[in-house]
Amino acid sequence: MSPVGSPRTVRGGIVLLDPTSGAVRRVITLQYNPDTVARSFQVRGAGGDAGAKAEALRLTGPPAQTITLDAEFDAADQLEFPEANRTVVEVGLRSQLALLETIVYPTVDAVRSAAALAAAGALEVIPPPTPLTLFVWSKHHITPVRITEFSITEESFDTQLNPVRAKVHLGLRVSTVNDVGVGTLAGSLAMTHHQRLEQLASRQAPAGIAALGIGGVS
């Protein structure tokens, strides 16, 4: 429990949006914020190593960014108050973990619909669009993403073999306008994140060239 008067800590998480209307379908918060969130960037240059010299300083779009994190889940605090947490008493962390797992599953209705179309002789069954996934890591970092890695390690169990402590590894690929276009909902959110980056960068006090120990660049 946080000391009285301490600032409230916001939690990171995932938001699922309707891909057409943008309506919020589901909010999934991480029980405990990860100690580390790793981000890597693959720069999109115009020419590459063998490209023309004139292309060496050109960028063809935002970098391909990946995010990885490990989140911990523990039912201990909830089990201290069983009357207020009946689901955890009955199934441990299975409900919380299932909420994350369903992100990478098509819905049962979608699977049944595709099977019915295939049985009826449909030449091509196009899967319905999945919800648009956002990774939220404070109000300053909200990005559309696609989950590329997902694993669960269950570490401790109750007497009914329900997990009561677990770690979840997530690998996320950030969607950019190169991936989803400018005119889509995902593209609009990607552009908003791009603009937010430039706004944050503009708040940093500029450094002078003298700070680098050189008098100028000729």
Image: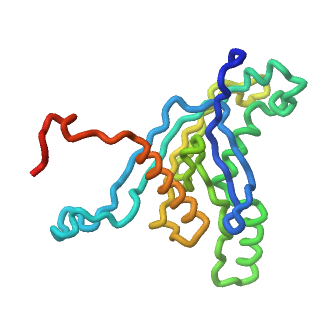
In this picture the colour scheme is rainbow
Q: Nearer the viewer, residue 60 or 115?
A: 60
**In the picture shown, does residue 116 fall above or below 109?**
below
**In the picture shown, does residue 124 fall above or below 95?**
below
Residue 197 on image: x %, y %: 46, 50
Residue 173 on image: x %, y %: 49, 53
Q: How many marks?
A: 0
**In the picture shown, does residue 164 fall above or below 216?**
above
Which residue lies at the image location 17% right of the left edge and 70% below the top edge? 52
Which residue lies at the image location 68% right of the left edge and 40% below the top edge? 29
Q: Is residue 204 left or right of residue 107?
A: left
Which residue lies at the image location 78% right of the left edge and 64% below the top edge? 109
When asked about the image quadrant of residue 160, the answer is: top right
Residue 76 on image: x %, y %: 73, 21
**In the picture shown, does residue 202 fall above or below 33?**
below
Quadrant of the drawing holding the N terminus: top right
Which residue lies at the image location 69% right of the left edge and 58% below the top edge? 17
In the picture as drawn, the residue positioned furthest to the left comes out as 218
Residue 71 on image: x %, y %: 58, 34
In the picture as drawn, the residue positioned furthest to the top comes out as 3
